[in-house]
Amino acid sequence: MNTVKIYINEHKDRFVEELIELLKIPSVSADSSYKKEVLRTANFISESLKKAGCDKVEICETPGYPIVYGEKIIDKNLPTVLVYGHYDVQPADPINLWDSPPFEPVIKKTAIHPEGAIFARGACDDKGQMFMHVKALEYMTKSGNLPCNVKFMIEGEEEVGSKNLSWFVPRNKEKLANDVILISDTGMIANDIPSITTGLRGLSYVEVEVTGPNRDLHSGLYGGAVANPINILTKMIASLHDENNHITIPGFYDAVEELSSTERAAMAKAPFLLENYKKALDIEEVHGEKGYTTNERNSIRPTLDVNGIWGGYTGEGAKTVIASKAFAKISMRLVPNQNWEKITELFKNHFESIAPKSVKVVVKPHHGGQGYVTPIDTIEYKAASKAYETSFGKTPIPQRSGGSIPIVALFEQELKSKTILMGFGLDSDAIHSPNEHFGIWNYLKGIETISYFYQYFTELSKK
Ligand code: BES
Ligand code: MN
Ligand code: MN
């Protein structure tokens, strides 16, 4: 066994215990009633970085939740790796669908994780994955195997749009100067099919409000004679896709890059079984844009989805009412080149233009961000690929993901370096859902792979 494997083997129980302590803190950034807990999590990260060997650790204040910064600079002439991650988590709702309380981590074996998985909100997204980097640093400093400089930037507002990180990064370019950005906040295909994420989708998130009459009305006295905002809203939403599941907003596809048939053929080589996919989700049939495969639909194609819709009476029993207002939250996943602010504007103009005179429509933009693609003929990608070859014994498959980490495009723009997305989660780990979990095998494999990355990246940078 090599030194990293020996170290992980000796310390794995403690590595798991420390992560469990971190997962006990409910750092829900979306809900201000958790403010104290979110701040306590920043302190926890700061202490962990100090213990792992950082020489300098700061809790950097922002207009929102703080960013934890840490560094260990061993030689200014050596390359610098900047690790990014987030310590905030999604709300745990709906709580009643969890088999165990979301902030009381438990270890359970599953078919996919026979060695056990930690069940808790944030286990995979992103506390568990972020903490792999802290433990990889601990191994490298304690064993004298840190080959280059390292910086950490761990934020507490990723799940709510990273607004203050966009504020922080341009103001701290020198402090954050680096040769590569390393992030574990994505997934891989399977434990025996490692992959590296080479793309992320962009995002435009909006909320719409449709107002009909100035008050809720008796649906018998007024029904049929005035516009029902819920009827109108659902009709407007339905019109946003045509019979081929193409989005109907004029100009929506203008900047979308069509992949060549060679690129699509390369994508199609990634192992994927439609039957298993359907079975895992209990669906008879998949659904999506005509002319594209499931893997294309969820990575290289843009989408529009309602994330929530409400209005009228939803309590027990029946109430005969025409509501005054109806609402929906709508997200559009974008591909690189589509400008999210432009798309938000196109949506707003179109949605307002299709509203009948009988209602008033307001579109409120929430947040968004650009998509990202990274080339694979770079030193940083080669170093990552070699790291996986060493730990998994297999060459990882480059794969574009459908998820978004909007801040990644800004990193490249402001800090002029490439990002490597080394994710060790699985789609079945249920991030953002009840019973989120992270495989202990994945956690330890991640720590190992990260350590190799530092070694190969430093070696390849010297050549
Ligand atoms: N870690 C996820 C993004 C992710 C997960 C990318 C898996 C690829 C694979 C991140 O925390 C997240 O949830 N992002 C949000 C966007 C954000 C602005 C709220 C998303 O993708 O919905
Ligand atoms: Mn995340
Ligand atoms: Mn997330």
Image (spheres, grey):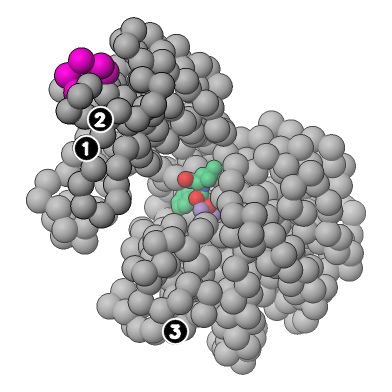
The picture places residue 220, in percent across and down from the top left corner, at 17, 28
Q: Residue beneath label 3, please?
A: 107
Q: CA distance from mark 2 to mark 3?
A: 53 Å
Magenta residues?
A: 223-227
Along the viewing direction, whichever of 457 and 120 lies nearer the viewer: 120
The picture places residue 219, in percent across and down from the top left corner, at 21, 29
SS label for mark 3: strand
Decide if residue 19 is in sight here.
no
- Majority SS type along the magenta span: loop
Along the viewing direction, whichever of 41 and 354 lies nearer the viewer: 354
Q: Nearer the viewer, mark 2 or mark 3?
A: 2
At label 1, the amino acid type is: Thr
Q: Which mark is residue 218?
A: 2
SS label for mark 2: strand
At label 2, the amino acid type is: His
Ligand 2: quadrant of the figure: bottom right
Label whose residue precedes the other's in the sequence (2 or 3): 3
Label whose residue precedes the other's in the sequence (2 or 1): 2
Decide if residue 307 is in sight here.
yes
The picture places residue 126, in percent across and down from the top left corner, at 56, 61
